[in-house]
Amino acid sequence: MLPGAELFIGLMSGTSMDGVDAVLARFHGERIDVLAHRHAPFPPALRAELMALNAPIDNELHRAALAANGVARSYAGLVADLLQQTGQPREHIQALGAHGQTVRHRPGEFDGTGYTVQLLNGALLAELAGIDVVCDLRSRDVAAGGQGAPLVPAFHRAVFAQPGREIAVLNIGGIANVSLLGDRPGGFDTGPGNCLMDLWILEHRGQAFDANGAWAASGQVIPSLLASLLAEPWLAVPPPRSTGRDLFNRAWLSSHLPAHAGSAPQDVQATLLEFTARSIADSLPQRVDELLVCGGGALNGALMARLQALRPGAAVLPSDARGLPAMQVEAAAFAWLAMRFKHGLPGNLPTATGAAGARLLGALYPA
């Protein structure tokens, strides 16, 4: 039995690279109450550097080390904001669960183990925040033969599962992943979430994202382009599986565009939204009673409408409907993982990641 009334902070910066979400969470055993939430964008120069580090570049080790310092400083700033907002002294916080910024994700490749890289200087974060830091949360699962992703299904099961109902929790960040919480629990990445739509609208309209999917809704789906995108071999890989910007990036999209060079940009955007919706809907099991959506994609009304149309038998709802706002779920999951680490409990769900078994996740940098 875990003691109650413990405070943890969760820090998450996902594949959209739009910034950092932080939550202050109170745990009573496994039950979580989010007391406060903060979001801050990355400084533009840091975001540009993190994006660049998703592909091979010159002087990678030096640039990655400095970017990891920048991520730590961004995290520490949000921690200070949370503590000021809530009036909590740092001594009351058991630990920070800090994800870091994924820049490479290649589990199982090259030598049979592969790797996953989340940039974060955990020692610097512990120094700046004055609170224990639990980070590098994916590597242990990869070492055990898993994908290291998605890590959130165990948390989703603790928070959202309902006896006798087939619940799926869909996180739509840059990459989308789903947790299955019914009779056969599991989880996997479904493919692109917002990443392709984000890069296309940034390139053509200078906007970081397509607010509510309005630009996509102004266009028409290009059937031949959609068919080309859906033919991506990775989409046929059975779970456990994970992916990232290593695959779904501008170069990948460019390889599908030459035959559609004269297409209107808004039509390409409409097709990318449909591709995201179809890749998600097609990956789900036949029976889903409720699809709870979190992450930035939950705020895209056009995408939510397509998911509902493609899966009419499921109630497609933002996670807010079940008590945890869509933009807080991922950060709350990393607070939960820090709590599990502190109590010596496993944090992964082997049926989701494919790891050889349950593992204690993370590395500790004491304050």
Image (cartoon, grey):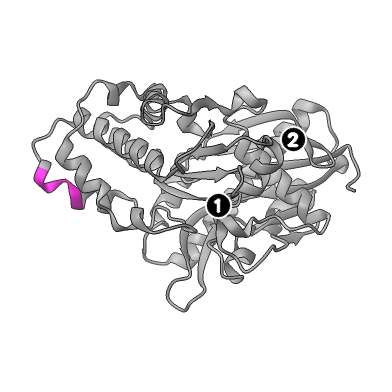
Q: Is residue 234 magenta?
A: no
Which residue does the image show at 26% across and 53% down from the upper left?
251
Residue 224 location, quadrant: top left
Q: Horizontal placement of 151 versus 92: left or right?
A: left
Q: Which residue is drawn at 24% across and 51% down?
A: 231
Above-or-below relation of 304 to 196: above
Locate residue 325, reporting x and y percent.
62, 27
Percent coordinates x, y for residue 303 in the rendering: 38, 28
In front here: 157 or 49? 157
Q: Is mark 1 on a helix, strand or loop?
A: loop
Along the viewing direction, whichever of 180 and 30 lies nearer the viewer: 180
Res. 6 mark = none
Is residue 142 shown to the viewer in this render?
yes
Main SS class of the magenta portion in the image: helix
Image coordinates for residue 55, horizontal then vertical, percent: 37, 59
> Distance from label 2 to label 1 (Cα)?
22 Å
- Residue matched to label 2: 24
Residue 351 image-quadrant placement: bottom right
What residue is pinned by disc 1? 150
Question: Looking at the image, which residue is at 28% across and 22% down?
Answer: 217
- Which amino acid lies under the numbered mark 1 shown in the image of this protein? Pro
Give the magenta-colored segment's residue range: 255-259
Label 2 SS: strand
Outermost residue, bottom side: 111
Name the residue: 28% across, 49% down. Answer: 250
Q: Earlier in the sequence, mark 2 or mark 1?
A: 2
Q: Nearer the viewer, mark 2 or mark 1?
A: 1
Residue 367 in view of the camera = no
Disc 2 crowd rating (10 Å Cα; few below 14, some 14-19, many 20+) is many
Check the image and report above or below for 119 versus 289. Answer: below
